[in-house]
Image (cartoon, helix red, strand yellow):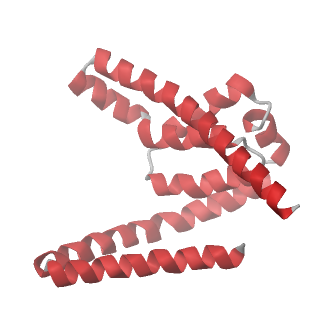
Amino acid sequence: MKRKGKLVQWIVFAVSVLIYCSVLFFLPDRAECVVDASMRSLVEMALILPAVMILLGLFAVWVPKDLIVKYLGRSSGIKGIALSLVLGALPTGPLYIAFPISATLLRKGARVSNVIIFLTAWSCIKLPQEMVELQFLGLKFMSLRLFLTIIFSVIMGFSIECVIRKIDARRGEISS
């Protein structure tokens, strides 16, 4: 399984290089802009990710698995959904920070649907964003978008969990 992960990383790297070379060849006037944007993103990640990894390490050590299973696990029910929404809506950092957090939650026993809800809330529901949306687009628009985002994040979470469960069941049948 680790070899497959390494292969995927190399494929992503190769595709990135191919895209950059294509831009360089077909749109040479845009190449500098692409490199600048890439470097800004790389610097931003280099500044943020070490702190996130340290916090995740502390989280992995200090937060017992039983606590995650109780509040976000299989039998967490509606409180797990609500907690996932709140935990996803509170932070204001970039989305790529949520992925290592999600991986840690899954390793500690969080339900897949709750992690999907957490990721969706992180990307689509931010309290500061909601205030700006309210100011510019109005209460009706903000409320409806927020309501639909919550509903569809829950539907998406359970749908993805169901698909993953079926895939895992098929893999179990194949390996047996």
The answer to whether residue 109 is above or below residue 7 is above
Residue 160 % position (x, y): 61, 42
Residue appearing at x 78%, y 46% in the figure: 109
Quadrant the C terminus occupies? bottom right
Give the image quarter of residue 29.
bottom left
The answer to whether residue 140 is above or below residue 93 is above
Residue appearing at x 76%, y 30% in the figure: 76
Residue 98 % position (x, y): 54, 52
Residue appearing at x 49%, y 77% in the figure: 11
Q: Is residue 127 visible?
A: yes
**Viewer-proximal residue among 26 and 94:** 26
Q: Is residue 90 visible?
A: no
Give the image quarter of residue 68.
top right
Instruction: Report whether 75 appears left or right of 134.
Output: right
What is the residue that sits farthest to the left in this orientation? 29
Q: How many marks?
A: 0
Instruction: Report whether 34 appears left or right of 30.
Output: right
Quadrant the N terminus occupies? bottom right
The answer to whether residue 38 is above or below residue 78 is below
